Amino acid sequence: MKARASVVSVGARTAIGLNALQTAMLFRAGAAGMAMAPLADVDGEPITMCFDKTLSPLLVGWERAVALATPALEEALSPLGGKVDGSRVRLLMCIDERYGRAEKASEDADAAAAMVTKIAARANALLPGITPDVTARGHASAAVCLPDGLALLESRGCEAVVLGSVHTDYEPAWINQLSEKGRLFKADNLDSFIPGEAAAFVVLMRDDVARRNELEPMAAVVSVALGAEAATPDNDLSAFEAKGLTRTIRQVAEPLPEGMTAGWAVTDLTFEMRRVHEWQSMLTRTRKVWSEPYAVDSPAQRIGQLGAAAMPLGMTLVAQGWRCGSAPAPIAVVYGGSEGGARGAVLLAAP
């Protein structure tokens, strides 16, 4: 089983941790980030949300996203300072689907442009010459852009790829939209999700570049797979079909040698039953991929909806878990599913 790249550095900022280590250790210990937020739903009632309580309650939208992303980006890039030429680094920035929808091009596109510009500027200050690329495919964005990033590394087109994202639901207008659609978690609405916010960045390198820069691999990236589901929140198709997710998991697991299985899954599942049903259907069809027993972690159920940050954060939790010796298995699958139907997975192995 050959690694295509290695994770050599990570950074995170979440509702339960100011950095990647805090987030990974507190998550493993069972911590949750739910609290009453200073935001109201369409009925004027306060909402339950997972949010960074160190940020000003008046900071919202893309400006809040920048405040979340900045420390996570700085944490991930700090080991590269003075070692790597920024012009040989690619920043793969994943953002939420709503920023790429044509029908809301004006308002959301402006917010996305401002957010990405600020984050890219900070990255360029840390690593002058770094080149950003943006993918607006939501939860599965990492699986959409990562194949090109890995190909660049393998062809020596760059020395490092920084894969990351920031997501925040802390925005009054967005909360109203979610509330109107009945998607916010409440005592009388359990088929829903808890709004959240998080930022996560992972730095990928070839092993020879990592050794040259005296960076120790935290996780090996073995494969990436991308598929699509027909069932979405906007139609009535059955999520139990799970054809796209099943193909995605089978494809990502293809490099596993005979007899080797994945013992750890990190998903983006919330409490919305359509996604849970899809996941359950996939598990029954891909039983040979999974160890007995296997562990499933779903951070969004304890630290809030993760949006496009789902897969980068999952990779961060896995890499940090192996670094600290708190991981439940040496082979992991990180999975994300976008609202529009895209399904992505990354197969990781302990270094």
Image: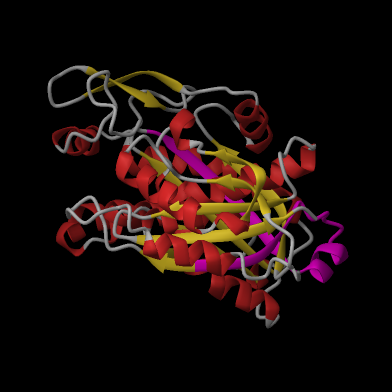
Q: Say whether residue 273 is magenta.
A: no
Please state the horizontal and vertical placement of residue 334, each as a whole percent of the image: 56, 52
Residue, far bottom: 155
Q: Is residue 131 visible?
A: no
Of 194 and 22, which appears nearest the observer?
194
Residue sitting at 20 percent across and 37 percent down? 173
Say how the picture is coloured.
secondary structure
Residue 312: percent from the left, percent from the top? Answer: 55, 51
Q: Is residue 14 visible?
A: yes
Residue 338: image quadrant is bottom left
Q: Residue at x 76, y 69 (%)?
A: 1
Residue 239 position in % (x across, y down): 30, 52
Nearest to the observer: residue 71 or residue 308: 308
248 lies above or below 96: below
Q: Position of residue 24 (x, y in %)?
A: 64, 34
Please tell me which residue is depicted at 59% across the width and 23% down the height of the picture.
30
- In magenta, the rendered stretch is 196-225
Is 120 left or right of 111, judged from the image as shown? right
Looking at the rendered image, the quarter that the C terminus falls into is bottom right
Residue 211 drawn in magenta: yes
Q: How many marks?
A: 0
- 37 over 274 or under it: above or below: above
Question: Would residue 27 be found to the left or right of residue 138 on screen?
Answer: right
Q: Left or right: 191 with respect to 302?
A: left
From the viewer's perspective, is residue 24 above or below residue 256? Answer: above
